Structure formats: structure tokens, C-alpha cells
Image (cartoon, coloured by chain):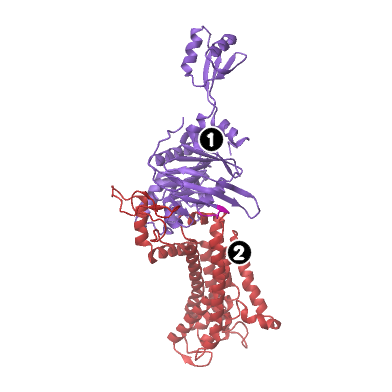
Chain colours: A red, B purple
Amino acid sequence: MSAAEPGSSYALVPGAFIPIRSGRPGAVGIDLRPAPRLGAPTASEAAQENARRFGGGFAVGRLFRSELRLMFGRRRNLAALGMLAAVPIVIAVAVRWFGSTRGGEGPAFLALVNGNGLFVALTALTVALPLFLPLAVSATAADAIAGEANLGTLRYLLTVPVSRTRLLLAKFAAVVTFAFAGTVVIAAVGAGVGLALFGGGPAALLSGTPVGLGTALLRLAMVCAYLTVCLVALAAVGLFVSTLTEAPIGATIAVVATAVTSQILGAVPQLEVIHPFLLTHYWTTFGELLRDPIGYDALVPGLVSAAVYTALFGSAAWARFSSKDITA
Amino acid sequence: MSAPAVERPPAVADDEGRGLAVTTAGLTKRFRSGQLAVDRLDLAVPAGSVYGFLGPNGSGKTTTIRMLLGLARPTAGAHRLLGGRMPEDAAAVLPRVGALVEGPAFYPHLSGPENLRRLDAVDRTADPATARERIAAALDRVGLTAAGSKRYRAYSLGMRQRLGLAAALLRPRELLILDEPTNGLDPQGTREVRTLIAELAAAGTTVMLSTHLLAEVEQVCTHVGVMRVGRLVAQAPLAELRAGTTVRVEVDSDRPADAVDTLRRLALIDVGADGHRVSAVLGDLPSDRVVAALVYDGVPVQGFRVVRPDLESVFVGLTGEGFDVSG
């Protein structure tokens, strides 16, 4: 939405607003001739100039940075990241003190931790995936619009003005960033603590192929990326729920409940028909990234599922938010 | 008593009315519950005016303001701000409009300046290079510089209201829409805000002031619009509204019968006595002529008053019911 669109029935020009009659009855026209410059630029003139200067990607960047500052400046969100960081630490310390598990008990990858510290990261991601990660993403996504509505700040943002589409996109981008940060925190802390306590001994992929540390780290990064994509789908659901209410807590509970319900349904074999359509169905396939060669065929459905969920709920959020009366 | 109604050259032109900063045509809002909150509103706020937007609680003022700013969609009707169609031209129009809607709202964990920085950051037409100066200037203007690093959470209601005003003044504005800006302020703060509004108006800013404090209206407004259960029951320059009222003279005298005779001789109408108090409708007669006549006739005068009905009685007359003066 640019400030002055050529072709619209009126346009704003620097200086005085002088009415002109346009050909069409009922239309409003404003003189497009340059007005005489008198002293300092007027407010609207300055606005025009700034819109030209900052109207492109730079302004989008400024809004996005502001969202990030808000997101990562919140003690609650930092506590959530701290909670996620604690997961690999607890796992690594426990294994170090009490030794590895007997006969493959515990979550996936746990038995491999002693051989290579990087498996601490993978174990932690596996453990955090059912609840902790979805909880962190749900809380931030659900807060996106409902939180601003709850504070009343939404009405002031929109009268600045910020276009609703732009605000929604910036909010979504910030939530996605947070989801990525969440997985990266687990992976990085896990890798760090794991390598410190267990070393980076000879790593073998799940298919048995030995790989160097560089490749292993790369695979870990790919796991983070895949899980972020999965969480983006949940974030889109959260964003949609967030546009429905002015109560961020209620919205958070609804989104977490969605993720948990999806997993419960996924655990009931009798419901196998609906499993491929569940939000969380493909989340655990990230293990395919640890095979040689990578099981892309198994990963594609997960990516498609996430894309469909994101498109569906993202559109729903947009449709709802762009037509909604702001009463808070 | 009231600010002079200065005629300023129109800053904005509109086919439906030249020189209007806000116009609405048949603006209507029906809630999903079926309640008609705003009913075919035709507002006309002249550019350069200080427009008092009055009405009891629940009369539809805030709903109207929400529609004006594009926060709520009208069920029917259309409106323009500064000549631009809303909500289509919101991106071009709203940067020139400062607003305070239904009380201030900020992030509780951020300080005042941080909150203003946030609002400035989301404004794509604001120059980030001047943000710091503009924020400092806005805070200074509302007397909030001392509160500096305090979190908004710790602000008093009055400080919150001031920060809300500072947000509205982050940039030079052509129109300010202020919903009860003195709510929660102490008498000193109320006076400061009134002075601020007068200054802004003198500099050419149109101010639309929603309030139910009649004293505020009498002191700063040049125009008024009165809402009652969703309808606009009056809209006029304040002076005009007053002109339509009846001015009476009151004479205190221990010879009321003589006073009545004198007033009747002056051809005043509705002359009546109540004990020692005699009153009549003044009409076009200058009040000093009445005093002179009383003295000439040797009527002892203990007290003489020219009584104009106060704004409150004017509004009670308009709204046909008790006006919620105190809020």
C-alpha cells in the first residue's frame, strides 16, 4: 500500500491541498501541480518523502526487528528458551552420572550418547518434540494477535497505521524465528554439552556409515530445519486461533491441545486412515536425515503436510484478521 | 469563557463539504447482537476546529471513533478523514492523524520511551533517524520526561494518559482524534492538557475531542456534536448553540412590585416575581439599559444578574434527559 497511488481518484501532493474538479461527478481530485515551497516541509510532505525512502524492504525490516525485540525481550519467552536448553543438559548429566541405558531403554538415540556427544542433541530434540517445543511455539503464536488485542496495543498499531496483512506477516515471521531459535537452542546446547562430556568420537549414521564431525553437524542442522518447518505448521494454526480471541492464555491452551490431540490420535492404530492428515504425523521422520543416503522420499510428505497446513491456516488467519472489527 | 471561533482557511477539500477534516455520510453500525450502536451519522468536523464530540456513556461515541479510524467496519455509510476515503486510503491518511482511543494501551514491561519507539518502528513513513528526537519532544510536550526509565506497568493513570497523548504527538498531525484525553488526570494535568489542545489548535491542527466533561467543552471547543443513543441530535458551532438559548435578567429588590413595573415598561416578556427576586427574558435589550431604567425609576436594587443557561441545561434540552456530567 503506497502512500500515493497513481490511478487512484486522488493523490496527495506536498504542500497545500487544493481541490480540483475531476471529470467524473462525485470524484475528489487534488491538484497534482507542485505546490510552492514555503519553508519547512509539511507533515504530509515529510511522510511522503519517508514513505519513498523507507517504504520498501527497509520498513518491513524495521517492523520485523521490532517484533523480534518484543519477542526476545519478553522474560516469559526467554524462560521458555531456558527450559528448552535445560532438556539436553539434564539428559547429558544423567547419562554421565548414571551410565548409559541397559538394552536400549529410554528415548531414541539415548543409547548412542556414550559413543558420540552429538546424540545428546538428537535425544533432546526427540524428548522436547511432543510437548516442550509445541508449547513454546503455541504460546508465542497464540500471543501474536490475541496478546496485542488483550493489551489494547493492537488498536494503536493499526491506527499508526500498520496494514493488517503486514502486521500478520511480521508476527508470523517472528513466531517462525522463535520456533527456529527453540530447536537451535536445544541442538546447540545439546551438541555443546554432549561434545564436552562425551567427546566427538567416531560417529556413525543410523545406516552405519561413519561420518566426520562436520557432516554430523550438518545433518544436525538439517534436523533443526526440518523440525522448524513442522513447527511452522503449528505456528500457522496458532496464528489463526490468535485472531479469534482476545485471550492469549485461552488461545495457547487451544493450540497446545490441538498438538496433543493430534499425537493421541496418531497413537491409536485403529485410526490409521486419518494418520497422514494429522498435524504431527510426520514430525518424527526427522530420523531419515540421519541415514545414508538421506531418505528424502520419507521426508517429502512431511514437508508437503506442513506446507498445506501453513497455507490453509495462514489464509484463514489472514481472512479473519483482515475483516475483523477491533473491539479491544 | 469560550475560545473564540477562529475561521481558518480550509486545509482539506471534499466534494461533500469543503474544509472538513472529518465527514461521515449515513455512518451506521449494527452489532452482531442486533443492537444499533450508531445510526445514520452525518458528522462534519470543520478543518481547524476543536470539535467537542459529546454524549452520555453508551451513546455510540467510541464506536464512531473506531469506525472513523478503520478499526471497525461500518454496517452502512461512508466517511472521509482529511479528504481521503476510509478505509481505502488509510495508509496515506492515518499517518497524519493522531489518536487516543478508549484510554491508553502500552506494553507493561517496556518504559515510556521504549513504547514510543515501538510505535515509531511500525510506522513505515516515519524516519528512524529522527525517532529519538521526536520521542523526546513528544514526552517533553506532555511533561513525561522525568518518568524516563520507569516501566509502563508502574505508571499512574495520569502518566499513562500522558503517554497516550505523547504517542498521538509523535509526529506533526493535521487531525487529532482524542477520546476522553483528561480521564484520570488531576486538576493540574487536566489544565495542562487543555492548554496543549489549545496550542495545537492554534497551530492549525483540527482536534476532535470526545468527552462528557462539559467544562472541557466550554473552555476549548469551537464546535460541538451531541450523540444520543446512536444518533447525532445536534451539531453546530458552540456560539450558535448558545445563541439559541434564552438569556434572562434577575433583579433582587425589596420593592419587587416596582421592579416588575419597570421591566414591563421596558417591554420585557415573561416578567415574574418570586419573593424579592424579579426576573424577565432579556431579549435584544442591552442589560445596562435595564439597570439605568431601574435606577431612574428609583427602584432599590440589591442585586442584578444576567443569567445564561449553562451548557449542561442546553444539553439536557438537546438530549431530552439527564446528562451524565461527571462520567
The amino acid marked with disc number 2 is Ala
Quadrant location of the C terminus of chain B? Answer: top right
Q: Residue at x 52, y 57 (%)?
A: A154
Q: Is residue A76 magenta?
A: no
| Overall secondary structure of the magenta section | loop
Residue nearest the observer in this picture, A121 or B40: B40
Q: Which residue is drawn at 54% across and 25% down?
A: B246
- Label 1, residues with CA under 10 Å away: few <14, some 14-19, many ≥20: some
**In this picture, is B249 found above or below A91?**
above
Q: In the shown orientation, is residue B44 left or right of residue A41?
A: right
Q: Name the residue under label 2.
A: A251
> What is the x, y in percent for residue A91?
56, 78
**Can see residue B142?**
no
Q: Distance between the residues labelled 1 and 2?
A: 42 Å
The quarter holding residue A319 reads bottom right
Residue farthest top in this picture? B298
Residue nearest the observer in this picture, A56 or A232: A56
> What is the x, y in percent for residue B254?
58, 9
Q: Name the residue under label 1.
A: B214
The amino acid marked with disc number 1 is Leu
The quarter holding residue B270 reads top right
Which is more foreground, mark 1 or mark 2? 1
> What is the x, y in percent for residue A321?
55, 62
User: Badge 1 sits on which subunit?
Assistant: B
User: Badge 2 sits on which subunit?
Assistant: A
**In this picture, is A104 found above or below B163?**
below
Element class at badge 2: helix
Q: How many numbered discs?
A: 2
- What segment carries the magenta color? B70-76
**Can see residue B62?**
yes
Residue nearest the observer in this picture, A8 or A290: A8
Q: Is residue B75 magenta?
A: yes
